[in-house]
Image (cartoon, helix red, strand yellow):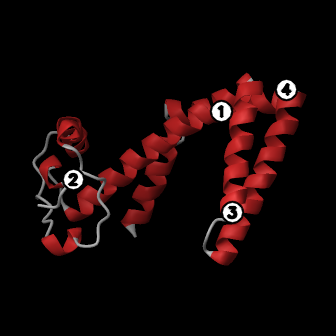
Amino acid sequence: MIYIDKARELGEALSQTPELLGLKSAEAAIMADPKSQEAFIQYQEKERGLLTAQMLSKVAPEKESLALIDLKVRLMNKHPLIKAFFVQQQKVEKLMAMVNLTLTTAMHGMPSANDLPIPEELKGMAQQILDRIGGGDSMEKMQISPEMLKGLNLPPGLTQK
């Protein structure tokens, strides 16, 4: 099971990235400040309650979701340490999205930006990201069939090829 060993190596490498180290540091700063800590724990409890409700019903209750977003915004405005945490958390999410996209393209091939259902003005930027993921090596091109695009809800003004 060499892939499990590789996954462990990846996890260890990711734990040392500036994004993850920054997130840990931001959380430690919150926990060192009693007012921020109390507010943050309150947020985490509400978030856990919402996730539990979502797991049970498979649909997030809209009212509770909006209340959690409202609480998050209020906490970010009132507590700079909490805002720093959420900013850092967003950086970690971007990193993980890049890792997941890299894994997916390694398994299924690399799409071209022209194959993606995105606005024309974003295709150049998307191609740069795809080139970065590929590491400069040519990879097998992912085959995107019309059937894969059926039922895809595209933003207004975009059409399927």
Task: Identify the secondary structure beneath mark 2.
Answer: loop
The residue where tag 3 is placed is 51
Q: Nearer the viewer, mark 3 or mark 1?
A: 3
The residue where tag 4 is placed is 33
Which tag, 4 or 2, sits closer to the chain's start? 4
Q: In this view, does 51 lie above or below 135?
A: below
In the image: residue 136, left or right of residue 100:
left
The residue where tag 1 is placed is 85
Q: Nearer the viewer, residue 17 or 50?
A: 50
- Which residue is at 17% across, 36% downward? 124
Q: Distance between the residues labelled 4 and 3?
A: 26 Å
Give the quadrant of residue 107.
bottom left
- Which residue is at 11% across, 61% downward? 161
Q: Residues within 10 Å of mark 1 (few under 14, many from 20)?
A: many
The reply to whether discs 2 and 1 touch (Cβ–Cβ < 8 Å) is no
Q: Which of marks 3 and 2 is in front?
A: 2
As drawn, the residue found furthest toward the top would be 80
Which tag, 3 or 2, sits closer to the chain's start? 3
Which tag, 2 or 1, sits closer to the chain's start? 1
